Image: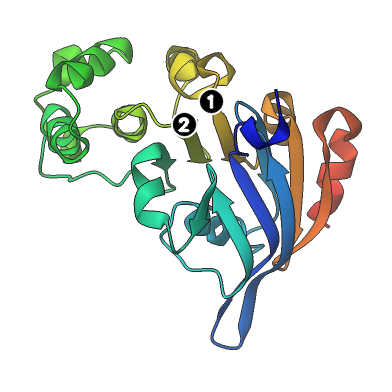
Amino acid sequence: MAAADAAPAAVELHDVGRAYGDRVALAGVSLRLEAGRTLAVFGANGAGKTTLLRILATLLRPHAGEARVLGLELPKEGWKARGRIGLLAHEPLLYRDLSARENLRFHARLHDVPLQRGEALLDAVGLARRADEPVRDLSRGLAQRVAICRAVLHEPELLLLDEPLANLDPAAAETVDGLIGRPAGLARVLISHDVEAGLAEADQVLGLRAGRPVLLASASEVAVSDVRGIYR
């Protein structure tokens, strides 16, 4: 197949940066993530991980460099990209006064997705029997399962995951693996503080310190000690 016919990269960044006033949150980030591959992002609190995820989710504009998601230029073509991205943020991004079922139905209408898709997801994560309870009455772990359903409801091509297994016990983590783990076969950008688990999921590794890349390599070339060194 000719190079011109090749599928675009899931993520392509060239010298991307972002600042909040005088504070540099991200600077000099360049990488390419192919479709179906996983980038694990490591770094201490305040290192720029969430800023990077928000740029990729089209929620923040980069102040420097060039960013493309699924072949679409950000922020210019961000409106085209949003329906092809699934975001699982640190906060669940759910309406707490609505039930799990109501949340998914609301998002299904936004994305023109059949309501049956939400029902199937609730069943897949073991929430069918509690689907009509307000999210505010659910435990953090159950709310996280609803948030995962919301993130994959529209069958995105790229998943942006911020500590996706937070508050999930091992059985629940196994339950959602087919939706957001390697078996899903999707391109993923994964923020994790669990070094061993993050490395096991990754094809590529990005380490950030004070907003700047200090490690960028294939996961097969990175040892746990290399990642731990980012935090020192």
Query: Can you tell which quarter of the image residue 10 is in?
Result: top right
Which residue position holds label 2?
A: 157
Pick the front one: 225 or 184: 184
Query: Can you tell which quarter of the image residue 104 is in?
Result: top left
Indicate the position of residue 182 as horizontal and vertical percent values. 59, 19
Indicate the amino acid at tag 1.
Answer: Leu
Residue 120 numbered tag:
none
Indicate the position of residue 67 as horizontal and vertical percent values. 59, 58
- The residue lying at 17 percent from left, 41 percent from top is 110
Query: Along the horizontal axis of the image, is 190 left or right of 197?
Result: left
In this orientation, does residue 173 appear?
Answer: no
Which residue position holds label 1?
A: 186
Pick the front one: 29 or 148: 29
Indicate the position of residue 171 as horizontal and vertical percent values. 46, 12
- The residue lying at 60 percent from left, 88 percent from top is 22
Indicate the amino acid at tag 2.
Answer: Glu
State the SS at label 1: loop
- The residue lying at 18 percent from left, 36 percent from top is 135
- The residue lying at 66 percent from left, 55 percent from top is 13
Query: Along the horizontal axis of the image, is 82 left or right of 136?
Result: right
- CB under 8 Å between discs 2 and 1: yes
Query: Can you tell which quarter of the image residue 49 is in?
Result: bottom right
Q: Is residue 70 above or below residue 58?
A: above
Q: Earlier in the sequence, mark 2 or mark 1?
A: 2
Pick the front one: 57 or 46: 57
